[in-house]
Image: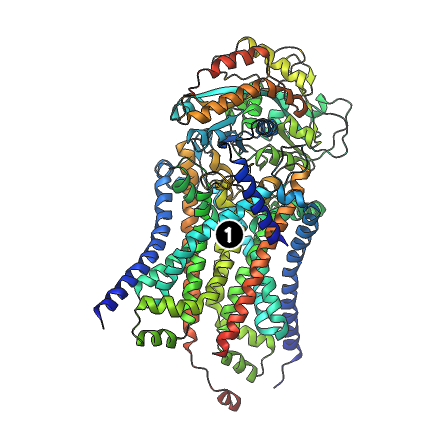
Amino acid sequence: MTPTGGRKLLSSLFVAFCAGAVLLALIPLALILFFVISQGVVSLNLAFFTHMPTPVGEAGGGMANSIVGTLILSGLAAAMAVPIGIVSGIYMSEYAGTRFAAAVRFAADTLNGVPSIVIGLFAYVVAVLPFKQFSAFAGGFALGLMMIPIIARTTEELLLLVPGTMREGALALGATRARAVFSVVLPAALPGIVTGVVLALARIAGETAPLLFTAFNNRFFSTSLRQPISSLTVQVYTYATGPYEDWHRQAWAGALVLVSIVLICSLLARLATRRLERMHARN
Amino acid sequence: MNAIHKIAVAVAGAAVLVTGAAAQTMKINGAGATFPNPIYQKWFSEYNKLHQNIEINYQSIGSGGGIQQVIKETVFFGATDGPMTADQLQGAPGKILHFPTVLGAVVPVYNLPGVTAELKFSGPVLADIFLGKVTKWNDPALVKLNAGVTLPATDITVAHRADGSGTTYIWVDYLAKLSPEWKSKVGVATSVNWPTGVGGRGNEGVSGLVKQTPGAIGYVELIYALQNKIAYGSVMNAAGEPIKASVEAVTLAAAEAAKAMPPDFRVSITNAPGKGVYPISSFTWLLLYENAKDKAQAKTMVDFVKWALTDGQKYCADLGYAPLPEAVVKLEMAALAKIKVS
Amino acid sequence: MPKSKSRSDVAFRIGTGAFGFLLIALVCGIGVILAIESMPSIQKFGLSFWRTEIWDPVAGEFGALPFIWGTLYSSVLALLIATPIALGIAIFISELCPAALRQPLVFITELLAAIPSIVYGLWGIFVLVPAVRAVETSLPASLRALPLFSGPPLGLGMLSAALILAIMVIPFISSISREVLKSVPPAQREGAYALGATRFEAIRAAVFYARTGIIGAVMLGFGRALGETMAVTMVIGNNPKVAVSLFAPQYTMAAVVANEFAEAADRLYLSALVEIGLVLFIITLIINSFSRLLIWSMARTDKVVAEPVEAEAAA
């Protein structure tokens, strides 16, 4: 029984709608990338990467301190989140059926969904006020909180993907559970875990709200962890909401650098995931 | 390419740090008003050129933020254009002193395409606009003040601060003096319950809003209007003259106050009497603890303030701020001695 | 089994479990700290905090109604715009598109998700808001008279905020829906085609089968929209008033916390803001948990045994 004309038409319209939806979503993406690239590229010069911000009215300022600040904050966040995330992920995968593991999983998913401004609020109360100091530590703490659930869940899922034969083989040879996991299972899943870390880094590198009252901001070049530190995101925000044309140009340049970081990380993660999928498919 | 640049910058930065850290770098953090941000950034930058081991990091988060963070001691000093209230001073863990640094003007900025003449405003009319009672540019009250100018029937969009602001304090302090309705309905503080309008962050945010929105009116520190080439109007002063904000007009406003300066320097000079006076003028203050825990930082700040009150004043005029009257500077030098530096 | 091995295993379990416990403790810690800091406000205002429209720091009167209104209005509107588009994309990628296009399209949607919110905000201020302002000014007077479109054409306001949120939320809903659709057993579609269905009808059957999961995906997108701060505060106008008009500047919970936190000068003001943060935390907790439950339950029900295709063809 072939479909009647009316149903066929409906189907064609539907297919057209779906294709149209894809195009519709492509438009803002294209526009954003177009503006960021076109506006940002013109302001991207050596001074941007090597100079500090200059006082209002003086030209030639740059965002060197912000770029380094973002790198430092990301490093701090990773230093905190990678151990906690990976080991929690190990627990969740090794003892997957238990109620405690389910609780940990629920906590990770909850933490993942907490709005970044609420994380910033929490970090302000526990990492800034008691020490009476805005600091890179506090900023790294806030960003680390956001990375933990991503790394934990990725680790859990990847460890579960490792064939049971590997774990069982190790255990059969008399290895302790710790040995089996750290020497056999974890290394097998490591590429995927690293991918997860890279993705988490890309995510937090673009965060602004949690840094507003933790890392604060710093006009000067600073690598001190106990002092306020500048970051690309907060600096772009400060410049974007200001009235000076020079600031706006620098904001676009900063946005371009940000988007480039995120794009590169996403691309790397994507390529790595595909190779992993192909490896697993072969098994 | 980006990665290599970043590594190069980081290495270069590390090298700078190693060489520059021969003398111990004194890092001091401060936060507060956006009103004086242009001159403060200039000062801290120039002072750093003179004393390369002193880095004073100032972030303009608004006067309310400056007061709050200095009370919480997350920053060493604050900056505000609205003096701290008695309650706020009570709530601080130690005695906080106010030190005026410059004088500035808050101007009514507007964006009215097609109108090239400079508009005149008065306190009562500005209050009515910000109360939402005057809603169109060709309202009779505005027409009366601006005889000879054809005002369009555009809607007025009020732009105000979304954050706690000393600029707001100065503005509403002035409005409250000239509009009993404003005084009772809205009041005077760094953050008020605005009857109408859109909110922007900092002087920067309000300038941006006004610049981008046809029909908008807002209030910003004079330098923001000048640097962003936004039109600003003249305001009727207590002597009945329409005065456009300028360094001279602001200095005249401070002349009266200088004669009767209270010992804690907390004084309002809006709507000051006298000819040629710009009515929406104000001091802006730095907030320092009398007895801070870090005496080395306290000494550095005292030295800095002394420099700012003398050599620093020469940078004022270029940025649209009025230098302090001599009499006030003398009083402040004496008051600075109160700060414990050892 | 040698004693050292079992002891080592126990130590392993405790050691790794401790990190898991840390995670749980962190999440509970956030809730507890927020609750403690918002006590003064909760005690003073109670439930009327959520019914009052006045946000007056001078008088110490705090009512969060405008923020709840702004948050819900912008998020619901964003979902209304985003859901059809996101589902269309998910269906296209998983059901309709040629295999070669699949990976690039998936990559592109991930790209949309990866763009930092501050960059959305930047683009919003300089590109979207003027465009919306142009649209607002060009509306005919008859439409402008309606309450939905009333007010001066600022560009900043609910419409810009909803549009930006929609763009940000589309990739979320789309990628999760795609996963959900992938888990629909092929038998569902094959059965439909065997009965002579058009593509639309077959897909409709699959979507119907996956409905709980898709609802879960939409709710996750909702949760994301509720908590978005930077992009929204840069385009919404930051005005704490309840308004119906799409053109009116409004305020959301996340935006007011971000803007006013650094300067909340007294205990009550601070705790009012923290209370808003607490409620945001609780709302997103509930929505995210519920949506994950929906998605999980959907993934479980595909234990349905795929009916042999021959049986269908014989019918």
Residue C38 point in image, percent of width and height: 38, 40
Depth check, front residue: B72 or A134: A134
Residue C94, quarter of picture: bottom right
Mark 1 surroundings within 10 Å by alpha-carbon count, few (fewer than 14), some (14 through 19), many (20 or more): many
Depth check, front residue: A266 or A50: A50
Q: For the image shown, how many numbered marks are present on the structure?
A: 1
Depth check, front residue: A22 or B135: A22
- The residue at 43%/52% (across/down) is A79
Determine the residue located farthest toward the top in the rendered image. B259
Can residue B290 be seen by looking at this rendering? Answer: yes
Question: Is residue B142 toward the left or the right of residue A270 in the image?
Answer: right
Residue C31 point in image, percent of width and height: 37, 48
Question: Is residue C232 toward the left or the right of residue C13 in the image?
Answer: right
| Residue to which mark 1 is pinned | A204
The correct choice, above or below, for B195 with respect to B124 in the image is below
Residue C25 point in image, percent of width and height: 33, 52
Depth check, front residue: A245 or A43: A43
Can residue C240 be seen by looking at this rendering? Answer: no
Residue A177 point in image, percent of width and height: 31, 68
Chain under disc 1: A
Q: Secondary structure at mark 1?
A: helix
Q: Which quarter of the image is occupied by the N terminus of chain C? A: bottom left
Residue B254, quarter of picture: top right
- The residue at 77%/29% (across/down) is B116
Q: Amino acid at mark 1?
A: Ile
Question: Is residue A82 toward the left or the right of residue B310 in the image?
Answer: left
- The residue at 32%/66% (across/down) is A178
The correct choice, above or below, for C177 with respect to B176 in the image is below
The correct choice, above or below, for B309 with respect to C124 in the image is above
